[in-house]
Amino acid sequence: MILQLTILNGTHAGHAVQVTAGTPRTFGRAAQADVVLQDVYLSDVHFALYCDEQGARVRDLQSHNGTFLNNTAVADATLAAGDRISAGQTVFEVALTDHALDAPTNAVTTTGEITAEDLVRGMQSAPHDCARWALHSEEGNYFAVIDCARDPDLLALVNRVDEEFCAFDETREPDDLGETAPFLLSLTPATHGLADVFEETWGRGHAIFLVSPRPFIEVYQHLISLVTWDEQGKLGSARFWEPLKLGEHLARMAPEETAEFFGPLACILAETADARVMARYARTPEGAVTATKVAMSLQGV
């Protein structure tokens, strides 16, 4: 079985990619994908195609905007000749044959044949995906503090995830978030839209991620106790929810202050100035804070 995917629109219109049995292909906008396309609405690694003697399939790789087969969103689906796949703003047409096809003269450049192991690596090698896997490796309950004041569209993300959440300042109107707009959001490995949370916040300074053995309400009450306002209603405490300021804030603390700051938190995960590197903050038995750097690659998680 050989699958040929022809691009019908956009920058790569008319170009084609062949997928043969045992050589799956990933498609996306970043170098981690096997086939890289110029479409800003694609995720870094958006979907995969694979085929064998039984047929061909398309699989969505937890993309942000979804993968559609004949205008229907799919997670994993069988392909037939003439089917159309839509991802981002790009539309592809499927052709299937049992015999060898002439190599398309206008083929999209790929990185070459990949193995099943390479497919998994492609799915997980983007920094925001690796950050998500790093969170999965921690034991406890997961939370995110998302700064919606930095990007009001993040409020829609918080609502879309459909997990328990609460604003740091509940008196704020959604259209007037002000400077104290962070939301504490509960997360689990099975959270709907968890990949979106990382894709829309990681590398942009919009969130930190927390691990705690305690439930949502206790973590929320603790974090609120760390936030103060002056008589004019201006923020009077450190903006610890900003990833790059978090490390500076912790570095200035004495051991007794770190105990008060961490409270029920086991650790905090945050991006650094290089989004490919994560900082993992945790307290030692002596009360000092360790900041372990974790490279955002499969070797790091």
Image (cartoon, helix red, strand yellow):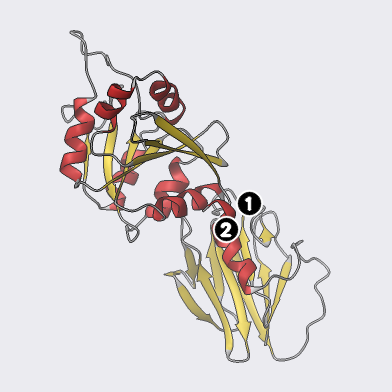
Determine the residue positioned at 47% across, 41% down: 202
Relative height, residue 44 to residue 84 (above, below): above
Specify the label residue 181 is tagged with. none
Determine the residue positioned at 24% across, 51% down: 163
Tell me if I can see residue 168 in this picture. Answer: no
Q: Secondary structure at mark 1?
A: loop
Displayed quadrant of residue 53: bottom right
Residue denoted by label 1: 30
Q: Position of residue 48 (x, y in %)?
A: 58, 69
Q: From the viewer's perspective, tell me whether residue 188 is left or right of residue 70.
A: left
Q: Who is closer to the viewer here, 243 or 46? A: 243
Q: Secondary structure at mark 2?
A: loop
- Going by the picture, which residue comes out furthest to the front? 286
Specify the label residue 45 is tagged with. 2
Q: Position of residue 205 (x, y in %)?
A: 46, 32
The amino acid beneath tag 1 is: Ala
Q: From the viewer's perspective, tell me whether residue 288 is left or right of residue 222.
A: right
Q: Position of residue 223 (x, y in %)?
A: 23, 31
Relative height, residue 98 to residue 136 (above, below): below
Marks 2 and 1 sit apart, C-alpha to C-alpha, by 7 Å
The amino acid beneath tag 2 is: Val
Whether tag 2 and tag 1 are in contact, CB under 8 A, the answer is yes
